[in-house]
Amino acid sequence: MALYTELPVYRDTYQLILRVFGVTKEFSKEYQYTLGQDMKRDALQLMCSIHRANKHGNRAEHLEVFLDELELLKLEIRLCVDMKLVPIRKQALLSEILGMLVSDTGISD
């Protein structure tokens, strides 16, 4: 069993978590403790899914859960852009990482 910390999907997820924490830090208090907190929790949950996928024999099932959670985070990021909480430039950086994560899993939608 490979160390999940050495996998590209782990490294990209870690970068996404850092970006999400950085972006949500700039939210107003109204959104920092609601939407921002949910986004941080959902980003951290992605890391848990990677660990489970590497730990258990049925990786495909856990990677499907990972992709479902990733879709939720995509929706939250889009909501932030629509509400003018996140500038388009930062959304582009987040979207790039999200795209890498989808390709890292090797599962097509």
Image (cartoon, rainbow, N blue to C red):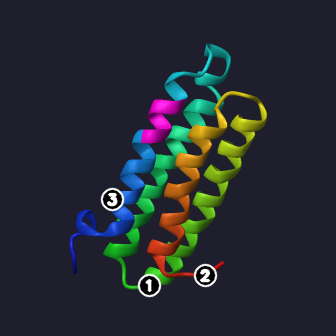
Q: Which residue is mark 2?
A: 108
- The label nearer to you, 3 versus 1, is 3
In the picture as drawn, the residue positioned furthest to the front comes out as 89
**Residues at marks 3 and 1 touching, judged by CB atoms closer than 8 Å:** no
Q: How many marks are shown on the rendered structure?
A: 3
Q: Is residue 51 left or right of residue 45?
A: left
> Neighbour class for label 3 at 10 Å: few (<14), some, many (≥20)?
some
Looking at the rendered structure, which numbered label has been put on residue 11? 3
State the image quarter where residue 70 is shown: bottom right
- Image coordinates of residue 54 in percent, x first then y, are 33, 74
Q: Residue at x 71, y 50 (%)?
A: 75
Q: Is residue 85 left or right of residue 13?
A: right
Q: Is residue 50 left or right of residue 109?
A: left
Q: Which residue is mark 1?
A: 58
The first of marks 3 and 2 along the sequence is 3
> Neighbour class for label 2 at 10 Å: few (<14), some, many (≥20)?
few
Q: Residue at x 54, y 29 (%)?
A: 24
The first of marks 3 and 1 along the sequence is 3
The secondary element bearing badge 1 is classed as loop
- The label nearer to you, 1 versus 2, is 2
- Image coordinates of residue 45 in percent, x first then y, are 48, 52
The secondary element bearing badge 3 is classed as helix
The one nearer the camera, 41 or 27, is: 27
The one nearer the camera, 31 or 91, is: 91
Give amino acid for label 2.
Answer: Ser
- Image coordinates of residue 79 in percent, x first then y, are 74, 40
Give amino acid for label 1.
Answer: Asn
Q: Which residues are magenta?
A: 19-23
